[in-house]
Image (tube, rainbow, N blue to C red):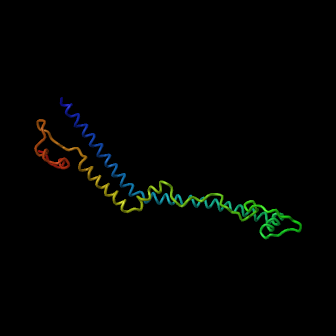
Amino acid sequence: MHDAIDQPDSHASWTISLAFWLTLLAAISAYSVVALSPKLLSYIQLRHDYHATQVRLVGLEHEVDDLTQVVDSLARDPDFVRKLASVEFGARRAGEERIPVDEHLQLSIRDNDPVFEMPADSLPWYGSAVYPFAVNNRLRGTILLASALTLVFAFMFLQPTLTTKTDGNMTAATQRTPPFLARYRRVH
């Protein structure tokens, strides 16, 4: 019979303990969002800038390769020099006939379109999600206040109360004490 009475007590104690630790975890999570978001945003921006710089570097390397080929062709291929002069300066040989074509089909060495697209200046979706927590001081203060109040709530209300039983009844001092102060009361 005594075990049946202790069963709900241990279940309540286990539930209160679980609620206490989950509340602490929530408070720690809220604090870590505020504390780590500026650093995470800096990391995301630096990684984004690094990627954009790498793409630009590869594009410049391709452009240098193309220009190197043009320089080599100018030095070694007289036919290429003639064609280039006719395209750039309108020079023609006697009796040469020109056929007009669309502009996008004409020969041009200055057509240096980038091979790779530059990434957009905006941050990835997760960078946009972190941004308010990193820069909005009002939101950061609200989250820190909520974290502090959650901790106070956990330590005041989510602790098993200490009660002593005398002949199956709680003492009179414990019955009058609010639950969050009962643990600090000295029971005789």
What residue is drawn where x is 39% and y is 62%? 136
Q: Is residue 43 left or right of residue 82?
A: left
Which is more toward the observer, 183 or 128? 128
Which is more toward the observer, 176 or 139? 139
Which image quadrant for residue 140?
Answer: bottom left
The residue sitting at the top extreme is 1
Image quarter hosting the C terminus: top left
Classify 86 as above or below 37.
Answer: below
Image quarter hosting the N terminus: top left
What residue is drawn where x is 29% and y is 46%? 20
Q: Position of residue 97 (x, y in %)?
A: 85, 64
Which is more toward the observer, 95 or 3? 95
Which image quadrant for residue 34?
Answer: bottom left
What residue is drawn where x is 37% and y is 51%? 29
Q: Is residue 26 left or right of residue 82?
A: left
What residue is drawn where x is 76% and y is 65%? 71
Q: Position of residue 149 (x, y in %)?
A: 28, 54
Q: Position of residue 93 (x, y in %)?
A: 87, 68
The residue sitting at the right extreme is 95
Which image quadrant for residue 103?
Answer: bottom right
Q: Position of residue 184 (x, y in %)?
A: 18, 49
